[in-house]
Image (cartoon, rainbow, N blue to C red):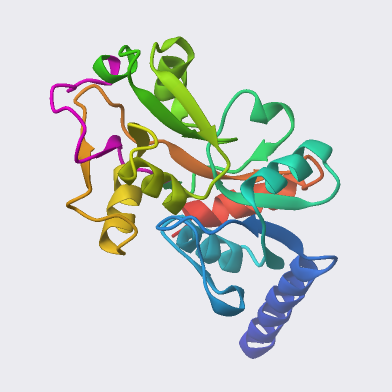
Amino acid sequence: MKGISWLAFVLLEAAAAGAYAAGPALELHIVHRPPYLVVGPNLQVSGSTVEPVLRAVEKAHLDVVWREMPALRQLALLRKNSGKFCSVGWYKTPEREKFAKYSNPVSQDGPWVAVVSSRFPRTAATVDGILSDAKMTVLVKEGFVYGSYLDDKFSTMKAARMTTAGETPQLFNMIAAGRADVIFAPKEEAEYYLAHGVMHAEQMRFITFKEMPQGYYRYLMCSLQVDDSDIARFNAALIAK
């Protein structure tokens, strides 16, 4: 009887896994943004934000397919709610919660720093000191959220704002070339590009701030068509490491 019971248990487990995999796969949208989101050859995905997602998806028996896509395109699809898909590694904001569902946090960034060129005056030691200077130009990536602390500061700053749709390496190169004075980024992201030669130590430097809050959480941001039960299963697997 014990052998029969064990076999029945195994068959039930297999049936449950098969039921989870039934139906179309859930699309997970990703953009290459190291060190959080890394897209390699043949759509091999990795990165500090992706690794917890991969483990939770496997543990939850979720059938998923990865799709690389520009960030602004991901946002447009989520707003249209045209299918069942999730964007990986996004910040949560009240505005986005109007058209998307969120998982539990999958990772947390480190504190943000200011990335400036070597020509930048060394007297600016605070966020307010930089943003209150009308002679400064702050480079901002179109469609990006910089977290509530910096977004609030940007809304009232006297510094000029330069907006670009360029990719992150291009933004750092613009700072090195003197086209703008400062860009804000999580410290680990800036360190990644410094280590990989996108920017060079003799051209750039980082400014850290005592008043800067801890880094923000990243989530799966899902279309409203994604089943709540799938998100709940993902969250449960995320906790059960």
Residue at the spot x=40%, y=13% of the render? 157
Relative to 89, say whether 8 is above or below: below
Relative to 90, say whether 152 is above or below: above
Magenta stretch holds residue 209: no
Q: Quadrant of the N terminus?
A: bottom right
The foreground one among 224 and 235 is 224
Quadrant hosting residue 108: top left
Coordinates of residue 70 in the picture (x, y in percent): 64, 52
Coordinates of residue 237 in the picture (x, y in percent): 55, 57
Task: Count the numbered circles shown.
Answer: 0
In the displayed structure, does residue 31 sit left or right of residue 81? left
Relative to 3, say whether 210 is above or below: above
Residue at the spot x=45%, y=50% of the render? 170
Relative to 163, say whether 150 is above or below: above
Residue at the spot x=60%, y=73% of the render? 43
Residue at the spot x=70%, y=66% of the render? 64
Magenta stretch holds residue 119: yes
In the displayed structure, does residue 38 sit left or right of residue 210? right
The foreground one among 11 and 212 is 212
Quadrant hosting residue 24: bottom right
Quadrant hosting residue 59: bottom right
Q: In which quarter of the image is the C terminus?
A: bottom left
Outermost residue toward the left in this view: 123
Outermost residue toward the bottom in this view: 3
In the displayed structure, does residue 153 sit left or right of residue 226? left
Coordinates of residue 200 in the picture (x, y in percent): 24, 56
- What range of the chain is rendered magenta? 108-128
Coordinates of residue 112 in the picture (x, y in percent): 32, 36
